[in-house]
Image (tube, rainbow, N blue to C red):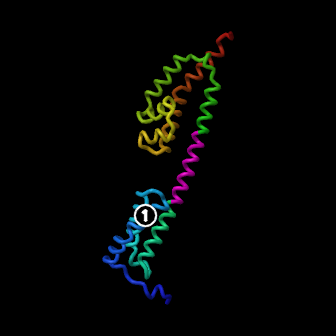
Amino acid sequence: MPEAYSKARRLSEEEFGRIFTRCRPMFIRIADSYVHDRHAAEDITDDSFIKLWEKRDEIVTGNWESYAFRSVINRCLDHMKSKTVQTSVQQDMHETGNRMQMYEINSLKSCDPDRLFASELESLFWECVDKMPEITRKIFIASRFENSTYNEIADRFGIPVRQVTSHIQYALKLLRIDLQDYLVLILILMMFKPLQ
């Protein structure tokens, strides 16, 4: 039998309390030095102690403090991996936003404002905007008319950036649907209008 197993002992409630009281503040500081987020460090440390207590009958160790410390380190690594994935997703969303913006720019470039019935189109546009769900309308207006970034909008409304993107996409879809018939009519009228 390996020496570590021969020195293994059961974790009592009293010993757990001593380890928790003595090690928790130090483990939080260590976790915070890795994840750079005090609240996340507290959660990581507390989750590690909870798991230690729940699994105490299954764990074979001679050094409970060392085991708890290793658990905190592993959870820090998991947290950092998760953050890396989250950053990658945010970058993908940013690239998608850029592509959408280029699509919108190209759509605007293809329009000839002199040949469109600006006041009628604007009126239909605002009718469509007014019919949007309130949060979608506010987010769309903040994005398109107040020049707010997706991050600024997310902060203002207390929602994730991904949700801002969804609301903008939904608003654009509603505009395409509501204005689609009108744009076809404009093209037909333009075909029969004499060239100047």
**Disc 1 secondary structure class:** helix
Taking 104 as reference, is 154 above or below it? Answer: below
76 w.r.t. 101: above or below: below
Residue visible at 42% across and 84% down in the picture: 8
Mark 1 Cα within 10 Å, few/some/many (few <14, many 20+)? some
Closest to the observer, 143 or 70: 70
Q: x and y percent of residue 15 in the render? A: 34, 77
Query: What residue do we see at 40% from left, 72% from top?
Result: 52
Magenta residue span: 80-97
Residue 82: say if magenta: yes
Name the residue rendered at 45%, 75% in the picture.
67
* Kind of residue sitting beneath label 1: Arg
Q: Quadrant of the C terminus?
A: top right
Where residue 128 sits in the image (x, y, percent)?
47, 26
Q: Is residue 105 left or right of residue 36?
A: right
Q: Nearer the viewer, residue 173 or 83?
A: 83
- Asked if the stretch drawn in magenta spans residue 101, the answer is no
Residue situated furthest bottom in the rendering: 1
The residue lying furthest to the right in this view is 195
Q: How many marks?
A: 1
- Above or below: residue 77 compared with residue 102: below
Residue 10 appears left or right of 78:
left
Q: Which residue is mark 1?
A: 29
Name the one closer to the observer, 68 or 158. Answer: 68
